[in-house]
Image: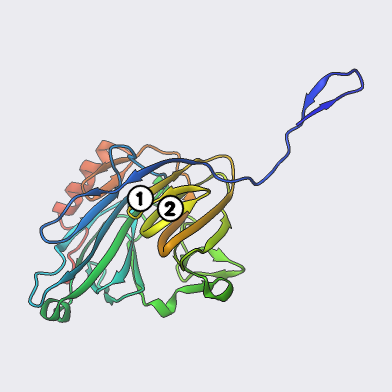
Amino acid sequence: MWLMNANGERLLIAFMTHGKREVRQLHAALETPMADLVTFRALPTGSLPELNPFLFLNHHGPQVYPPNNGGLPFGPHPHKGFETLTFVFDGEVAHSDSTGQTFVTGPGGVQWMTAGRGIEHAEISPESFLESGGPLEIIQVWMNLPAALKRCEPWYRGYDSAELLHVSGPDASWSWHIISGEVDGQRGPVASQTGLFMSWLDLNPGTTFSTSVPAERGVMLYVVRGEVEVNGVPAQSRAMVELTNGSGTDLDITSWDDGALVLLCHGDVIDEPVVAYGPFVMNTEAEIQEAYEEYRSGKFGRAGR
């Protein structure tokens, strides 16, 4: 806004307003099937190599497995230097890891794993699912850790739907499911080491959900199902909505005729080099080589053994 001073000179006055986050670009998830597992990769892609502090998002399904199926193909494998969050929207995932943790996550549940200094785990289908089959839809997200936490102790916890924080909108027009972070003085069950806010939204048809995110935080907004408008920009299912950082805080998400399911996550940007190779995410090539040597020597332990 321009004002005049006593000498008739124009002065630019900057007002601090919330304003809306700008949608920079939409990125369609890429189909990357894994045997008979329907898979779409939304992060990284050629147009979106990272979304700091988020590193990776694979969307598996939706699909229906027949009886006597082979199930999920994620047998024992290692990780180091980051965290994972697996959303189970349909079906079941059986987890086991080298810290001795086991858990079967069902519909509406999640599992959070901190790889830290190194862990081996497996995410497969339980015997009941292998025998009977059924619907399956899961999403896995990788979240970066800063250098100071890349060698923290590994940790895992599975959560049933009832253990999450659920917040409903007026007349149940939307439901907000929070895994970590705070809403209206209530907190999700995971106390994130890096202050991550991890959640998803169920929106009824024709519903608008409004919230705000601090301008400096990196936002990951992924449309799982349905079609929405994000601050007035249309986005279809399996689209990653890239938002600008540094200005604007407000988000309006409006569902269209069929309703929608949307991941809404945000976190502090980690201003460090990212070197990712296979299942490891570190800061240098030397650290990646070290991770492989540690895994081969058995320092991560073995899942289920």
For image coordinates 17% across by 58% down, the residue present is: 77
Tell which of 110 and 263 is nearer to you.
263
Disc 2, SS: strand
In this rendering, the label closer to the viewer, 2 or 1: 1
For image coordinates 18% across by 77% down, the residue present is: 126
For image coordinates 30% across by 44% down, the residue present is: 44
Classify residue 104 by image quadrant: bottom left
Any part of residue 213 in sight: no
For image coordinates 26% across by 50% down, the residue present is: 41
- Left/right placement of residue 57 relative to residue 271 reads left
Q: Do the residues labelled 2 and 1 touch (CB within 8 Å)?
A: no
Position of the C terminus, as image quadrant, is bottom left
Q: Is residue 42 above or below residue 256?
A: above
- Left/right placement of residue 68 relative to residue 256 reads left
Any part of residue 185 in sight: yes
Q: Mark 2 points at which residue?
A: 221
Disc 1, SS: strand
- Local packing at callout 1 (Cα closer than 10 Å; few below 14, some 14-19, many 20+) is many
Q: x, y percentage for residue 273?
A: 37, 37
Q: x, y percentage for residue 76?
A: 16, 63
Q: x, y percentage for residue 130?
A: 12, 76
Q: x, y percentage for residue 155?
A: 34, 65
Q: How far apart are marks 2 and 1 (CA)?
A: 9 Å
Q: Name the residue under label 1.
A: 239
Q: In this view, does 10 lie above or below 280?
A: above
In this view, the residue farthest toward the front is 257
